[in-house]
Image (spheres, grey):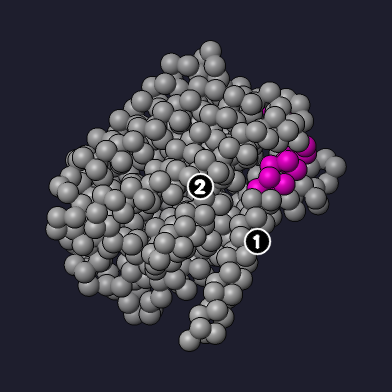
Amino acid sequence: MTRTAAILRELSAFGQLRFGALRLLGATLQILATWALVHALTPEEAGIYFRGFVIALGLSTLLRGKYEIYMAQHILGRDAASISMSTGALLAQLARRTLLRAALLCAALLVVTADLDIQAPQLQTVLQTYLPFVLALPGVSLSSLLGEALRAANRTLGVVVATYAVNLSILLAVAFAPADASLAFYSWSFFLGSLVAAAVAVVLARRVFPTTPEEAAQPASPEQLQSVDSLELIGLARGAQLWGPLCILSIWATPLQMAEYAVAARTAMIVDFFLPALNLTELNLTGEDSMSATWPTLTSESRLARQLAAALFYSCAMVAPLLILAPATLALYGSPYGSSLTIYVLLLGVQWVNGAGRPAVRFAVMQWDARRIGLVIGSGAIAGVLACSLGVAVYGAMAAAGGSLIGALILNAGAILMAFWGRPRLGSGYS
């Protein structure tokens, strides 16, 4: 028994090292792709390119918001027993609906852009740049929906692996771009990467949430669809909280300000590559089966408090070195991105807040109080958008970063308050 336990510990340690290496590779690809892109494009071109990111990622968030929330509720165990179909079948149903919504919006945007191409020939170059980002909407929406389902199931490594495709496509585009490559050339690389990312996400989701073709073809019940539709406003508010400040920046800011924000944001995102794994490692060390498909059952305030303390510790441990290295990190990108220090620090603050509050957010989804959750998310969205709107004319990208931080603070603080004071005692009747 002792030898078997030792072997299992060695295998577990090897698995942690392997997973850590894959996450490190994902973070490295993220940094390299950003570095390669900003060196291949002028700051103004990079700003135009990253506006395309907002089109694809921001709109896809609004499209899939209610589906993500409903899927997270199901995976976290709130209503799994009351639904007759398997998790994989339900995810397939929601994925098809997400694809349909994305395809319809994509078609509408293509009609608008075709009309603009005729009516305003001076916009032809910009429209050619944004066309691939519009076409990428279905792929981005599908990969993001499946990625969030994997994240809800604590299969966060799958989310990291799915991001390889887009970053690799950017690196390959920069490496093989002809000397006279247009901005549209790099946009099409994003489109191809989004297709590969969607395919990878489908493969990973099928492994984690297996289902048969017959189950996947089973239609959702009217009651399920009604439950999904009831989350529309909360899903839209969540999308506004995440992307509202950046959308405002993309409309009103100069391309240079857009590029500065995007470089700082993509660099700060490396925190998200590692924090989930670090939190899960701590839970495994305390004997909690955090790698199961459902979050460990919370039966007391002390258990949630321990998870929050661990999340806070790892968030600080991850973000503090990045803050110290911030000037040197931004210097890697060259001028003018080295002057984005304040923006980068604010966005690192967003990552720190989201990491520290993650257990409370998951608990709020699991226990689900629609009125309180809607109030918290709506307040965060309004405050973040308002802060950005008031400051973007003067502070530019800094206002968007500040608005994002305000929204994240309200969301995570609200989740913590709901967990400890907004509901009946955690140990009284919750299993």
Q: Judge the density around disc 2: few (<14), some (14-19), many (≥20) Cα neighbours within 10 Å.
A: many
Q: Is residue 306 left or right of residue 187?
A: left
Residue 295 percent location from the top left of the image: 35, 61
Looking at the image, residue 359 lies above or below residue 124: below
Q: Nearer the viewer, residue 127 or 78?
A: 78
**Stretch in magenta:** 30-44
Residue in the image at 22% along x and 72% along y: 84
Asked whether 26 falls inside the magenta stretch, the response is no
Q: Nearer the viewer, residue 174 or 430?
A: 430
Q: Is residue 32 left or right of residue 179?
A: left
Quarter containing the C terminus: bottom left
Looking at the image, residue 226 lies above or below residue 201: above
Q: Which residue is mark 2?
A: 314
Among the 4 quarters of the image, the one containing residue 214: bottom left
Q: Which residue is mark 1?
A: 21
Front: mark 1 or 2: 2
